[in-house]
Image (cartoon, helix red, strand yellow):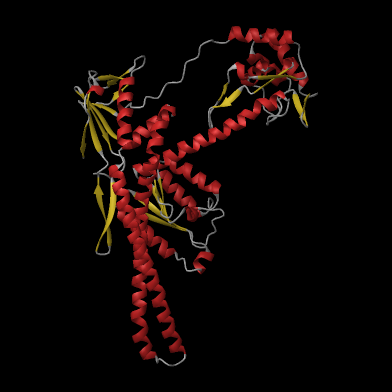
Amino acid sequence: MEKTKSVGIWIRVSTEDQALGDSPEHHEKRASLYVEAKGWKVETVYHLEGVSGKTVINHPETKRMLNDIKTGKITGLVFSKLARLARNAKELMEFSEIFKTYNADLISLMESIDTSTPAGRLFYNIIAVMAQWEREEIASRVAASVPIRAKLGKPLGGAAPFGYKWDGKQLLVDEKEAPIRKQLYELFLVHKRKKTIAKILNDKGYRTRNGSKFSNATIHRLLRDPMAKGERRSNYTKSLGEKKHWTIKPESEWVMTACPAIITEDVWNRCTQLLDSQEVKRKPGRKSVQIFAGLLKCKCGGKMYVPSRTSKYVCADCKQTHIAIADIEEIYFQHLKSFLLTKKDLTTFLERANESIQNKQKELETFKKEKVRIKSEMDKIMNLHLKGEIPADGFKTYYQPLDEQSKQIENGIVETEAQLDFLKVQHLNGDHILENAETLYEKIPTLEQEEKRQVVEELTQSILIEGEDITIKFGYAPIILPIIVGNTPTCVHNNALAVIIIIPKRNVFAHPVWFKNI
């Protein structure tokens, strides 16, 4: 039996908000009702009443929450809106990274974000992919200006290499470091070992610019840099992404400009030839990520993987079932297109959800108007009582029913807001997928293998190879519509979007495809 998801509720209401009538109790009840509607369990509540959102990362309750995430006590955090979690953008990003690391979910009711749902995760994946494309466009525009600046001899950012310094926009030889760098080349021609050169320099008391000892990697980098012979090399590297290594661009893209020399060209060439003869020409490549590894299943129940030096997925158990990598990828993505772009069911759901949202909003407005009316009646009675026109005995008779009704209406407002939160989360996720499905499909060929794998994991329940048939079970977000039984939100599941595609394994595209609702 699947374990009930345990979540925490985050309550942060500043003193100013409380003065305006924004109570912590209201936020907690609204979140509790959402958790109840999802069938989850509230494990704990984090109270930060009266705390400013400028910085919360070092607050004791924040530390308790992060510890609960890391230890698995909770696997999700519910809050009324992102600004309640924190107003500091840097801290919000830190929270996001921590939650991602520990596979925990963020649920923001105001922004209708719930990463516990497949659609919510896919929603985040699409945003991330789109953001990556946008960053790459910006990076390409910046990169286009680099060769121009390099040809003009201008600084491109960062410090000058060891042995050199920038004086304004002019590159000059550093009188203190240049003799050490020159000695480095001369020693290498004699000893022919980078490790030996590093030891000699370190034993003499020389250090790099940041005070570190010379290492093999530092010696190698300085030996290879042609700046020492009077040729400044620019626009020759590019980043592989955040926290990843840099790679060398094709030599045709390099920009070479003249600069002051520390050694002769003959010395540099002799050192380079020596390095070339020492280095291993071929290095092992990075192991490729197989999109369907472990997701493909054989009829015997075993999972299928790609053994080394093969181009097929093979059942790890029976070793009998196999399919070519290229075949399963072509089959899957062709039929994924049909699944993503079949909008009828999703459109119908969105229309229904939109109607439900509008009805709930009208109900909420009615509650709020009634709350204002009752508050006015209560104020009138209180004023009459203070003026002595209503005696103490009569005051209770008039005032108590209105006070009771006011509390009931307040509960009704909170419950209706919780139901709206639930509907909006479902609607937003579905609407975003509908709008971006076609774009997502078009961009799939441009994604990295890891990103393709992520999309497949989010959209696919299972892929079964059974005899001559391939059964693909797409299960992108079961639609969950809340209904009200008495005063309790209840969930109804409608799996209209989950379909099974059964494809004949042989001559795949010459046969019809059978769809059936789950």
Where does residue 34 sit, x and y in percent of width and height?
34, 56
Q: Is residue 240 left or right of residue 467?
A: right
**Residue 67: image x %, image y %?**
45, 47
Q: Is residue 35 above or below residue 206?
A: below
327 relative to 235 in the view: left or right: left
On the rendered image, what quadrant is the C terminus found in? top left
Q: Is residue 4 visible?
A: no
Q: Is 173 or 441 nearer to us in this picture?
A: 441
Tell me the residue at 23%/20% (across/down).
Answer: 507
Residue 97 position in % (x across, y down) = 48, 41
Q: Quadrant of residue 234?
A: top right
| Residue 269 visible (yes or no) | yes
Which quadrant does the N terminus fall into? Answer: top left
Q: Quadrant of residue 120?
A: top left
Relative to 373, say whether 473 is above or below.
Answer: above
Residue 440: image location, x then y, percent: 40, 35
In the depicted view, which residue is nearer to us: 365 or 308? 365
